[in-house]
Amino acid sequence: AAAHLRAEDARQRGIAEGKPDPWITYPQTARGLLLTPGFLAPTLAFVASIGVTNAVSAFTSETMHRAGFVRETVIDGLGAGFQVAVMVGGIVLGGYVDRTKQFKSVTLGCFALTLSALGFLGIAEGYDLNLPQWAVVGGLLTLGAAAGPIQPINAELAVEVSYPSDENAVEATQQLMGNLFSAVLVPMCVAASAVDYEVFEGVGPNTDIRGDTLVLMGLVVGVSAFFTTFDSPLKRAEIDAEDVEISGNYLARGGYNKVFQSWKRAEIFESFTAAYNEKDALREEALALFNALDLNSDGKICRAEFLTGFPELDAKTADELIAEADADKDGNLDFEELWAVILSVAEDEARVRA
């Protein structure tokens, strides 16, 4: 909520300064994201995950009734359990992928398990196969734990491949597409559920599978097949992996410096027109940036002003950046401290691009 408020404040200030409203420019931003190489695959995976989990949630009550559950409180609890499985799966696998960057293999594994769980529930969700209720519940929870993590994993993957695009725009684009697709998919599944298809004919009575299950399985197979073609670089991870050492200023720390990399990712050059090696012009633009951040014009940028100026940063990262640049350790940034950081980043960029 706090990040949303900061973003909205930044939007309103930008409008007051004559900048275009990002809400108006969003369609162009979304189009640019969709045309970014590698962006479509994680977005389709994200959308498919939302569609599957929403459709399954819509049919949970009916599925549990078929499995022999009759008490609505129990069925509601199982529905809540499905959502918990989605959340826990996202936390566990999302954390693993964040550490290992194995986006593709984990996503494909989740899709394979999702497909298996859908097939199991579609064929054996309480027809005349007489499976125990715990097996049906286990299939439902497995489905949630497999399909759920696809969303956070591929939200992060989309940010990686589209870096340095605005993360908020990436999230908004995926979420919008997911919600719109679900609005179409759920009614489609409702209509398809009226049709049964016989499977394993002769093996047992009523071993059929409904049309809605086939729709979801077809969706998973199609998106999985497309996702296998994903082969785009992880741009943000590549920047994080750089070994940077800059001497001659207080940013030097004997090798890779995580905080310095964060300063490079803070997008402080977005509004600069001066080249990295044009120090005089760059200093003038740095001063203009400082004055824009110094909202109360006291000659210093405090933590609140810094967060307001860079709404894309979380509080922890902002504290790290301020602490790194705050040479006199007074908790604020004066112009010379900010300029030292900008100059350091500029010098490194000029060296890299030379």
Image (tube, rainbow, N blue to C red):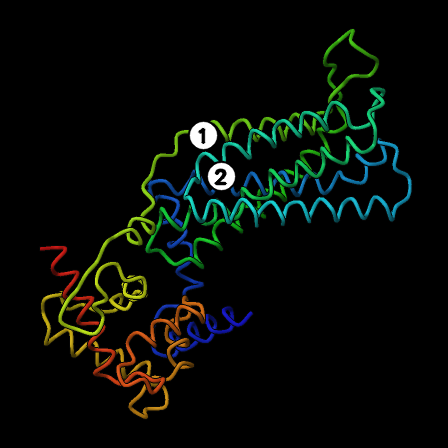
Q: Is residue 327 left or right of residue 82?
A: left
Q: Crowding near pointer 1: few (<14 within 10 Å), some, many (20+)?
A: some
Furthest residue in direction bottom, as rendered: 298
Measured as percent of width and height from the top left, residue 124 is found at 77, 24
Question: Distance from label 2 to label 1 (Cα)?
Answer: 9 Å
- Mark 2 belongs to which amino acid? Leu
Q: Residue furthest top?
A: 202
Decide if residue 4 is on the left or right side of residue 160: right
Q: Considering the image in quadrants, where does the C terminus appear?
A: bottom left
The quarter of the displayed image where residue 341 is located: bottom left
Relative to residue 118, is residue 83 depicted above or below? Answer: below
- The residue under label 1 is 226
Q: Quadrant of residue 320?
A: bottom left
Q: In x, y percent, where is residue 308?
A: 41, 77
Q: Residue at x 34, y 72 (%)?
A: 321
Q: Residue at x 91, y 39 (%)?
A: 70
Tag count: 2
On the image, the x and y values in percent for residue 268 come to: 28, 69
User: Which comes before the other along the chain, label 2 or label 1?
Assistant: 2
| Residues at circles 2 and 1 in contact by the CB criterion of under 8 Å | yes
Give the amino acid at mark 1.
Answer: Phe
Q: Which mark is residue 44?
A: 2
Instruction: Residue at 39%, 79% (x, y): give it.
Output: 16
